[in-house]
Image: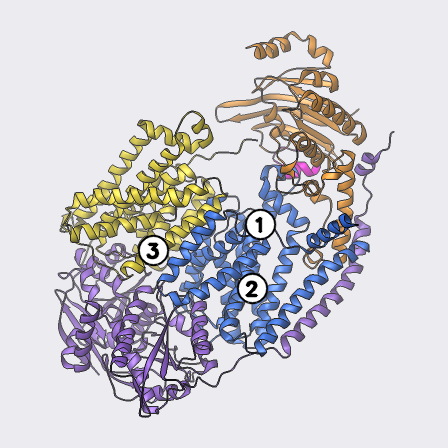
Chain colours: A yellow, B orange, C blue, D purple
């Protein structure tokens, strides 16, 4: 097990990018939901967990193939997102934002512990529906699943960007995120737009659940907790509300964690992430791609 | 009559946009000055620059305070406020969930001290200070007929009273210059008339310089001793109401804008 | 002097309630009605009251959304654990509280000066990050015994000590809130720009509230370490900050009485749920969502229990009758 | 000049100086007042405050109450629920056989299970309730060291013994002065013993001289074992890195190990993460031996790692499928567990199962279910025939039992070596 410095560097780059693509995938959903109703949807990480469990069951028991598992998990994620929004967040749309945040935390607890109660909290192995294959490129290892995740993350980012910029619904979403009352006045259906955003964002999480389950081969009811918070950090670093920002933030956090671990400071990898977060916020208070809106006096 | 505030070549750029360009003006003791101009002329921006809410891109503002003349550029808003420049806002900015009395007391924060110990342990000196400062505030409120509503939350006051309270809050700062940003906005003629009397009273009784932005020309002409006219961020004209009324440039810029 | 006399009445009322509460609890304990299980619950509730009122000062009164309360609690807890392990005397314990408070104040200044410029959720996530950094550092230090945490910490924080500390910190916070300082921080919460224009140095007042909150959190941490006699870095993670936040929001943001009530309600709920095993957190989460949906401003909104209002209320009634 | 109220208001009197003087005076007065209050408070604190000290719980009814203080939710919920299954099974078996023989009279076990949600304060509260209100004879649990140490003061006050199936910190059973905690016991190895065994095995049997450590830094289990290994390993530690529970990506650390020329990797942690480490190490082409401890001895490990990858993997364990062939108690347990829960028994369940039976043994030996007697009985347990081996409780209340090292090849246990 020997490797040249350059090979190690590129290997770590690949490691960082694949970890980053996972954060990016989750951050996309976070950023969309936050962008539209300014709510840190704590339950987002748990929808990702639901997606993973759905994938686990349909592959194991209904023998879905990968694509169907992925698409159905996106659908399940979307439905879960819409239901959560309808029952838990919609009644609180005019309540103080901190109240909605606590509800989001409550939903997150409910999903985590509800799943623990129903299915136990022991980790399960995810069915290996795609046999992992390693490619050696100039001594650097990269697996087919890593490529798949990286490509999916980028693809979804582009699709989202197109939806937001080009479609009518996308325009409505942007309008609502700027001023919900004004959007309603010009005839935009507020509820439908917000539901659509939740569906879209949550379907990203559902897809991430299947992909990450496949990649790491281990799922459990609490799996959404840590990546959920990291993904939110990624979204904030990138500029919350911005789709490219979420991706850049995700890759940045992934690369940073990899860098810190590769120099032997793994005990401080989370501390480094939070430190960089604070520094970025101090320099760019709205994140890298965020627009810093000053209050009008 | 001596100069209390002198503004030289003040410029403010927002990105590529010049909101205020090369504005110079002077304010004297105890005078009532109006700042007029079409919408978007940069009046509120000028107020924001003078009171430190935003910082100028270039230019100088000097103020003759009780401790000699100081430059206001680069000073924070609270420092400028404590030097004696108080203001109200175009869209009322009261502390909505505080009582009328507390709104006024907040403005008096820097006029007294309560030691940490006496605050935390409620030493007798705390009660004395509180009583004394509350008395001062209530007296001030009484001058403006607000003594009945001291315990009312600011957000529960009628609109016109809210405007009045904002003026009282500014006066509680014991200012030397008071900036009023469209004090009559949204008021009916009766309320406007009340307000006119109020501003006159303030200026007369408190001996302070008052600067006001106003669109209501009858109010402006009725009140102001001098008028500055701002258009597209630049100072278009200045003079007495009679002079301004007859200034062709003003008529063109102002009426032209208003007609279209 | 009349002002003093008038306020004397309210202050004495509070004092009587506190002393009566103490003797009631003490009697119930001597009678065996409060056993060590209920005592344990009461102490945990007490510590949560300190934490929640301190956080409410920052969130509810200064309007600064901090999610890093557990970090400052950790500082107090470790100060007490380390000092009393080496010097197991009451003097050592009280010194450790002071040391913990001082370190927490320094940490709060280091964290607060840069981050309090941020607003809303950005501030929340920055303070959460800062608290995590504190926890990770503690997790990797020798003196704190790393992730194993510390145990066999001598117990000085018996229930009377905790009771007195709860009373003292609550009084201090309530006094702070109803003073010149309290008005200043509330004005910052209401409208930062207007506050600045009213001569309020918003940066300093925000920091003052943040630092005060951190100091009380450190006291709570000290009591926690000394009462439970065991601490570990995992006790002070994001989830702990969130659970304190939940107490604050459930009680009502901006209501100290609400924080006290919510700490009691949640304390009892939490204890009652011990028998439900895995289902416990499911019930807790469902309760949380339902309370928030049906009572979005918390149990008490921004209302406070005040003798001034009670007394003047009766007076007004009296006048009507006569 | 018209002098009005407003004018007076503006021209404020210079009252600050005067105020300063007044303040000093009143400060003095108030400080004395405050001192009085403080003194009163001290008196409160000093005299006649209630405190409870127990003399143990007597068991006079027809049942024996045994409490369970367990991590059923929260971070360690997964491990806690495995233990609960083991406990439940042991109790069912005992009750089906009529109960525990107390001085000739069979008494059934009344099991009281409570959740401490992996929190120290809740653990203390649960212990207080079990010991004082439920009047249990003994407590099984908690699973983690931190939750365990949090209950120690309360059970000691109430004189109720607690037997933890899996608290591994060396000082767990000790007081600050090094003396043994009279009511604290454990059924598992302590870290120094297990870490040392792994170190010796790695050096002597695997002949590894350069070892990289990747340990769980979020629990005392991982760090304690890593420390013990480091202290007792005669070769060189070339890298010492950590992860946190819940981490899923170890590629960066494993890649960094490549350049360290390690002969073996020591991974003290639980199966959830170690399984992933094995998986990712083998994927990354790292084929050196991976050595771990009993936290990874779980059937789920191989599933997460992938059978193909679980090769050249070693771990210390008191108990396993392999050992069960030689140990009839274990074989019986494995079979019954499979029948009851439809899965292969994990180590945590086995340890918990043994814990209940050790309590039973203690009660039968002492012919009493009084909590103090149970404590005495637990301290005297010798050559107890458990699923996890023949157990003797030593003077520090640690479970002494033989340790074995198992080898995995293609996901199957192919070898089991006993270490002395």
Q: In this view, does D256 lie to the left or right of C313?
A: left
Q: Is residue B73 magenta?
A: yes
Instruction: Classify 10 Å Cα crowding around label 3: few (below 14), some (14-19), many (20 and above).
Output: many
**The one of C92 and A258 positioned closer to us in this rendering:** C92
Residue C51, label in figure: none
* Badge number at residue A112: 3
Please state, as top left, top right, bottom left or bottom right, where the N terminus of chain A lies in the image.
Answer: bottom left
- Residue C219 tag number: 2
- Residue C192 within the segment the image draws in magenta: no
- How many other residues sit within 10 Å of disc 2, few (<14), some (14-19) or many (≥20)? many
Q: Helix or strand or loop: what does disc 3 sit on?
A: helix
Q: How many other residues sit within 10 Å of disc 1, few (<14), some (14-19) or many (≥20)?
A: many
Q: What element carries label 2?
A: helix
Instruction: Depth check: give the residue in front, D239 or A277.
Output: A277
**Closer to us: mark 3 or mark 2?**
3
Task: Tell me residue C303's x, y (percent).
Answer: 60, 50
Q: Measure the alpha-carbon separation of dots 1 and 2.
A: 21 Å
* Closer to viewer: mark 1 or mark 2: 1
Classify mark 1: helix, strand or loop: loop
Instruction: Determine which of the numbered discs, if any, sits on residue C254 in the image.
Output: 1
Which stretch did the figure color magenta?
B72-83
Where residue A157 appears, x then y in whole percent? 28, 37
Check contact, mark 1 vs mark 3: CB within 8 A.
Answer: no
Asked if the residue at tag 2 contacts the one at tag 3, i.e. Cβ–Cβ closer than 8 Å, the answer is: no
One can see residue C129 in this view = no
- Asked if badges 1 and 2 are on one and the same chain, I answer yes
């Amino acid at each position: 097990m020997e490797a040249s410095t350059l090979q190690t560097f590129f290997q770590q780059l690949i490691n960082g990018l694949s970890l980053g693509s996972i954060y990016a995938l989750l951050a996309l959903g976070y950023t969309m939901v936050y962008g539209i109703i300014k709510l840190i949807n704590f339950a987002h990480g748990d929808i990702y967990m639901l997606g993973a469990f759905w994938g686990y069951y349909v592959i194991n028991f209904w023998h879905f193939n990968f694509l169907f598992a992925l698409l159905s998990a996106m659908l399940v994620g979307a439905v879960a997102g819409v239901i959560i929004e309808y029952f838990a967040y919609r009644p609180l749309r005019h309540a103080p934002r901190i109240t909605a945040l606590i509800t989001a935390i409550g939903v997150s607890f409910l999903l985590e512990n509800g799943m623990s109660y129903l299915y136990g909290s022991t980790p399960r192995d995810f069915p290996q529906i795609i046999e992992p294959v390693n490619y050696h490129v100039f001594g650097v290892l990269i697996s087919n699943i890593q490529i798949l995740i990286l490509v999916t993350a980028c693809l979804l980012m582009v699709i989202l960007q197109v939806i937001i910029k080009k479609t009518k619904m996308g325009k409505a979403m942007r309008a609502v995120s700027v001023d919900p009352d004004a959007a309603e006045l010009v005839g935009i259906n507020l509820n439908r737009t917000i539901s659509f955003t939740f569906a879209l964002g949550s379907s990203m999480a559902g897809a991430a659940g299947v992909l990450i389950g496949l990649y790491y081969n281990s799922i459990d009811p609490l799996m959404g907790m840590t990546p959920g918070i990291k993904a939110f950090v990624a979204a904030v670093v990138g500029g919350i509300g911005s789709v490219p920002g979420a991706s850049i933030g995700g890759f940045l956090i992934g690369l940073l964690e990899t860098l810190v671990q590769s120099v032997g400071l793994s005990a401080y990898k989370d501390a480094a992430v939070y430190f960089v977060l604070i520094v970025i916020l101090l320099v760019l208070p709205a994140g890298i791609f965020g627009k810093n809106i000053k209050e009008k006096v | 009559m001596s100069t209390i505030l002198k503004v030289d070549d003040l410029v403010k750029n927002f990105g590529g946009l010049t909101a205020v360009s090369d504005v110079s003006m002077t304010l004297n003791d105890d005078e009532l000055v109006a700042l007029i101009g079409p919408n978007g002329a940069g009046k509120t921006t000028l107020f924001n620059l003078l009171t430190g809410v935003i910082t100028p891109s270039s230019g100088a503002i000097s103020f003759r305070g009780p401790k000699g003349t100081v430059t206001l550029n680069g000073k924070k808003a609270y420092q400028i406020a404590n030097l004696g420049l108080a203001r109200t806002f175009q869209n009322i900015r009261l502390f909505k969930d505080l009582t009328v009395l507390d709104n006024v007391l907040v403005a008096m924060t820097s006029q007294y001290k309560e030691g940490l110990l006496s605050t935390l342990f409620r030493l007798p000196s705390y009660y004395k200070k509180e009583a004394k400062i509350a008395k001062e505030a209530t007296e001030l409120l009484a001058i403006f007929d607000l003594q009945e509503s001291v315990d009312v939350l600011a957000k529960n006051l009628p609109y016109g009273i809210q405007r009045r309270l904002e003026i009282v809050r500014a006066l509680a700062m014991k200012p030397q210059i008071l900036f009023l940003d469209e004090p009559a906005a949204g008021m009916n003629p009766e309320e406007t008339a009340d307000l006119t009397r109020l501003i006159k009273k303030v200026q007369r009784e408190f001996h302070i310089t008052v600067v006001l932005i106003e669109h209501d020309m009858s109010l402006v002409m009725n009140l102001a001793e001098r008028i500055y006219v701002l258009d597209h961020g630049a100072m278009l004209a200045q003079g007495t109401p009679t002079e301004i009324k007859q200034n062709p440039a003003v008529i063109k810029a102002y009426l032209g804008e208003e007609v279209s | 002097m009349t002002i003093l006399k008038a306020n004397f009445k309210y202050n004495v009322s509070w004092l009587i309630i506190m002393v009566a509460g103490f003797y009631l609890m003490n009697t119930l304990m001597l009678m065996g009605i409060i056993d060590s299980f209920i005592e344990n619950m009461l102490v945990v509730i007490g510590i949560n009251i300190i934490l929640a009122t301190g956080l409410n000062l920052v969130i509810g009164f200064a309007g600064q959304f901090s999610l890093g309360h557990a970090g400052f609690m950790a500082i107090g807890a470790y100060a007490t654990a380390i000092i009393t392990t080496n010097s197991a005397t009451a003097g050592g314990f009280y010194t450790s509280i002071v040391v913990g408070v001082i370190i927490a104040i320094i940490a709060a200044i280091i964290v607060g000066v840069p981050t309090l410029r941020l607003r809303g959720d950005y501030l929340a996530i920055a303070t959460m990050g800062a608290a995590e950094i504190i926890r990770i550092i503690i997790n990797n230090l020798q003196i704190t015994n790393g992730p194993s945490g510390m145990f066999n910490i001598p117990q000085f924080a018996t229930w009377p000590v905790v009771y007195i500390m709860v009373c003292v910190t609550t009084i201090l916070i309530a006094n702070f809130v109803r003073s010149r300082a309290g008005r200043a921080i509330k004005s910052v919460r209401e409208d930062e720009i207007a506050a600045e224009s009213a001569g309020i140095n918003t940066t300093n007042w925000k920091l003052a509230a943040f630092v005060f909150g951190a100091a009380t959190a450190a006291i709570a941490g000290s009591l926690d370490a000394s009462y439970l006699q065991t601490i570990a870095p995992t006790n002070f993670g994001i989830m702990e900050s969130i659970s304190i936040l939940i107490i604050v929001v459930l009680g009502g943001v901006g209501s100290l009485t609400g924080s006290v009530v919510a700490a009691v309600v949640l304390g009892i709920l939490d204890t009652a749920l011990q028998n439900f095993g895995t289902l416990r957190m499911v019930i807790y989460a469902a309760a949380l969502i339902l309370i928030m949906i049906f009572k979005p401003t918390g149990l008490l909104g921004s209302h406070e229990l005040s003798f001034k209002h009670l007394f003047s209320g009766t007076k007004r009634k009296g006048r009507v009758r006569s | 000049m018209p002098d009005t109220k407003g004018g007076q208001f503006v021209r404020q009197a210079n009252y600050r100086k005067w105020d300063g003087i007044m303040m000093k005076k009143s400060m003095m007065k108030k400080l004395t007042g405050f001192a009085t209050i403080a003194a009163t408070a001290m008196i409160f604190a000093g005299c006649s405050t209630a405190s409870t000290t127990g003399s143990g719980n007597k068991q006079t009814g027809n049942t024996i109450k045994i409490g369970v203080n367990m991590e059923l939710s929260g971070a360690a919920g997964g491990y806690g629920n495995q233990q609960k299954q083991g406990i439940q099974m042991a109790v069912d078996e005992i009750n089906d056989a009529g109960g525990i023989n107390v001085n000739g009279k069979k008494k059934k076990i009344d099991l009281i299970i409570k959740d401490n949600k992996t929190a120290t304060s809740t653990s203390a509260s649960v212990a207080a309730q079990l010991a004082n209100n439920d009047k249990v004879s003994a407590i099984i649990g908690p699973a983690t060291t931190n939750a365990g140490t949090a209950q120690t003061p309360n059970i000691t006050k109430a004189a109720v013994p607690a037997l933890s199936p899996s608290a591994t910190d060396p000082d767990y059973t000790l007081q600050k002065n090094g003396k043994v905690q009279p009511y604290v016991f454990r059924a598992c190895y302590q870290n120094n013993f297990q870490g040392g065994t792994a170190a010796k095995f790695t050096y002597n049997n695997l002949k590894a001289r350069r070892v990289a450590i990747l340990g769980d830094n979020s629990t005392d289990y991982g760090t304690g074992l890593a420390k013990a290994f480091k202290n007792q390993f005669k070769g060189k530690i070339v890298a010492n890195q950590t992860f946190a529970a819940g981490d899923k990506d170890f590629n960066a650390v494993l890649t960094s190990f490549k350049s360290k020329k390690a002969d073996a990797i020591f991974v003290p942690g639980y199966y959830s993460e170690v399984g992933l480490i094995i998986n990712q190490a083998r994927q990354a082409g790292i084929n050196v031996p991976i050595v771990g401890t009993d936290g990874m001895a779980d059937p789920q490990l191989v599933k997460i790692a992938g059978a193909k990858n679980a090769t050249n993997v070693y771990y210390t364990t008191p108990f396993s499928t392999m050992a069960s062939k030689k140990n009839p108690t274990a074989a019986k347990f494995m079979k019954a567990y499979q029948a009851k829960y439809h899965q292969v028994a994990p180590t945590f369940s086995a340890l918990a199962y043994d814990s209940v039976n050790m309590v039973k043994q203690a009660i039968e030996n002492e012919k009493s279910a009084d909590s103090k007697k149970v404590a005495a009985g637990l301290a005297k347990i010798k050559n107890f025939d458990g699923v996890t081996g023949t157990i003797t409780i030593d003077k520090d209340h640690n479970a002494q039992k033989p340790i074995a090292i198992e080898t995995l090849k293609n996901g199957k246990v192919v070898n089991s070596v006993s270490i002395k």
